[in-house]
Amino acid sequence: MPEGPTILLLSEELKQFEGNKITGVRGNSKAGIEITKDAVIAKIQNWGKQLLISLDNGYFIAIHLMLFGRYAVNEKKPDRNERLGIDTPTGEFNFYACSVKIQKGQPEDFYDWSVDVLSDRWDPREARKKILKLGNEMICDTLLSQDVFSGVGNVIKNEVLFRQKVHPRSKTGNIDDEILDKLIKDTRDFSFQFLEWKRVDVLKANLKVHNKKTCPRCGVPILVEVMGKTKRKAHFCTNCQVQYLI
DNA sequence: TCCAATGTTTCGCC
DNA sequence: GGGCGAAACATTGG
């Protein structure tokens, strides 16, 4: 389910538990979750697609919902195996079918918020530098690189490329500087648009190319092709999106 | 009924 | 050792 904006919403929802003591821990996670028992939840953060729960005992929990992950706040999803469930005096939250890691140290030691497109520390110049460093790869791969655009997933990738009229197979080294800068900027802008649509549950209705049949600009059929080293599906309009090859 | 889908890591092979 | 592909994990709406 999740790209960065979804995790940001989850993070917002869990802020109510900051300052709470963990009175109970359950779940089939093999990450060593017992160590969280009796600790106090110091801080809830999100970095890209990761949810980070800092504790007052020197550890933090990193949760990634992957493709199928689910969660429930102050309720349980019936007939599901709990991966991690946390009880506090004022309520509980539960995770299913996700990746759970227990890390020693601070999230700041592990994650760089200047590459998180939803962070107020996001730095587009950093993104540009990293793109150049990566060499001449397809933009569809670059946009999915969590080291460059943390939080961007396949939906944001497809929509931003359509908005900026860039063909997913374009090579980064061949895209005009000006276009590339606009593309970088729009990953953040559109991620916030995604967030607001998601917040009021109108995301799907507002997508322009992802899982759409025809181009809303010109009416030409939208193509779907697996491409790049990431082997993900690109949804795009061959008429509106310019392919930068040379 | 079957399949794809907003994802990432790990393993084995060359 | 790097790069690549397959496998693994796990869920459910269409």
Image (tube, coloured by chain):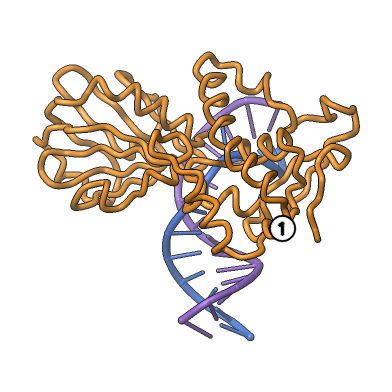
Chain colours: A orange, B blue, C purple
Query: How crowded is the residue under tag 1: few (<14 C-alpha within 10 Å), some, or many (20+)?
Result: many
Residue at x-position 63% and y-position 54%: A141
Residue at the outermost top position: A200
Residue A123: x %, y % from top left: 45, 43
Residue A149 in the image, given as x and y percentages of width and height: 51, 46
Q: Amino acid at mark 1?
A: Lys
| Relative depth, front residue between A20 and A91 | A20
Q: Residue at x 10, y 43 (%)?
A: A57
Foreground pick, A79 / A229: A229
Residue pictured at 56% horizontal, 26% vertical: A194
Q: Quadrant of residue A10?
A: top left
Of residue A128 and residue A94, the one placed in the foreground of this image is A128
Residue A134 position (above or below residue C13): below
Question: A186 or A208: nearer the eye?
Answer: A186
Left or right? Give the position of A220 relative to A111: right
The residue that mark 1 highlights is A171
Taking the view exactly as shown, the residue that stands out farthest to the front is A178
Report in which chain the residue with disc 1 lies.
A
Above or below residue A213? Residue A203 is above
Give the secondary structure at mark 1.
Answer: loop
Q: Residue at x 30, y 25 (%)?
A: A14
Image coords of residue A37 (percent x, y): 12, 38
Q: How many marks?
A: 1
Q: Is residue A15 left or right of residue A46?
A: left
- Location of residue A246 in the rendering, given as x and y in whole percent from the top left corner: 81, 61
Question: Position of A69 compared to A137: left or right?
Answer: left
**Residue A22 occupies quadrant:** top left
